[in-house]
Amino acid sequence: MTRTISLLLGTTVALSAATAAQAQELNLYSSRHYETDERLYSDFTDLTGITINRIEGNADELIARMGAEGANSPADVFLTVDTSRLQRAADMGVLQPLENALLEERIPANLRDDDGMWFGFSQRARIIFYDTERVANPPQTYLELADPAYEGMICIRSSTNTYNQTLLAAMIENHGEEAAREWAAGIVANMARDPQGGDTDQLRGLVSGECDISVSNTYYMARAIRRDVEALSAEDRATIGWVFPDQGGNGAHVNLSGGGIAAHAPNMEAAVAFMEYLASEQAQEYFSAGNDEYPVVEGVAIAPSAMELGEFEADDVSLAAVAANLPLAQQIFNDVGWE
């Protein structure tokens, strides 16, 4: 006898009677820190009857915890942001491969691990912002950010930031190690201040006049457009322009939010059901509407706040290949003095 969980995709997950009771719960380890994700979890429970038990924290702490727990770990699914953290979890042995036709069909190959260790479920573009009153000719590519013409003008986060690590790793994949090294050194030479703060702080650097050009993920600006957040008001945004880089070349670099099945998942059927749910149209729309991100599934509606930033071509480089370049990226950061 089996019980079937039906998802909005029109797909089903069949649970044996012996595991039905076990599959009534899912243990989620997540470093996503967005209050808007509550809707994702409650909708999944409403659809399936599966209760989600959440353990939230810093990604590295959660990865270490899963490793220390070993075979006794209660974790079923690990969710986090950025390819670097997903790959770190895979390298640490706390994830297991998943062969799943539905996920492989809906999620583009470049946005998931080649061996099924992790899958991307939402994305954000890492783009160039600038002050429209002080910069007449903003950079149109990532490489142009290192042009001496922009000396002393750029605000950007530290080299320990996962978004920058993945961006440099993508530069290595797209342009080669030598060009990526020259680029990193050029960025250091063009910094308006020492790296500090988060992505919103880079945008606020434009408002304060500390810098003329900055690099940030799209959803920080989209969120401000949707909510007129205190950190970046409508008045603050009035003179901020943006460029989706490399539109005539590789396309804009994207960061992933994604997840994988825990290595010792005790509730495997529920874990697979949750992963499939995150690729459903309902969940994909909510990643965008709730957190101003871009869906990974083609054809899903994009939130008006994100659409206001404009359409763009994304880099289709394999993020699994990019992940392999992360150790070299960190070495380059160290070598060029990017703090």
Image (cartoon, rainbow, N blue to C red):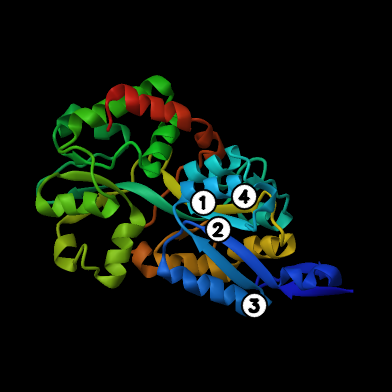
- Secondary structure at badge 3 equals helix
Q: CA distance from mark 3 to mark 1?
A: 27 Å
Q: Pointer 1: residues within 10 angstroms few (<14), some, or many (20+)?
A: many
Is 191 drawn above or below residue 221 in the view shown?
Answer: above
Quarter containing the N terminus: bottom right
For marks 4 and 2, give the one nearer the viewer.
Answer: 4
Residue type at mark 1? Leu
> Do the numbered discs 4 and 3 sit on residues whose CB atoms are within 8 Å?
no
Q: Residue at x 45, y 65 (%)?
A: 288
The amino acid type, in three-letter code, at marker 4 is Glu
Could you tell me residue 261's position as x and y percent? 65, 53
The quadrant in which residue 274 appears is bottom right
Mark found first going from the N terminus, 3 or 1: 3
What percent of the width, then of the height, locates residue 90?
60, 42
- Spatial CA span between label 4 and label 1: 10 Å
Q: Nearer the viewer, mark 2 or mark 3?
A: 2
Amino acid tagged 2 = Tyr
Q: Amino acid at mark 3?
A: Leu
Q: Quadrant of residue 14 in the image?
A: bottom right
Question: Answer yes or no: do the residues labelled 2 and 1 have beta carbons within 8 Å?
Answer: yes
The residue tagged 3 is: 47
Disc 1: which residue: 62
* Vertical arrangement, residue 256 with respect to residue 144, above or below: below
Residue picked out by circle 4: 69
Distance between mark 4 and mark 2 Cα atoms:
13 Å
| 3D distance between C-alphas at marks 2 and 3 | 20 Å
Using the image, tell me which numbered label, if any, was put on residue 29: 2
In terms of sequence position, does the residue under pointer 2 or pointer 1 come before the other? 2
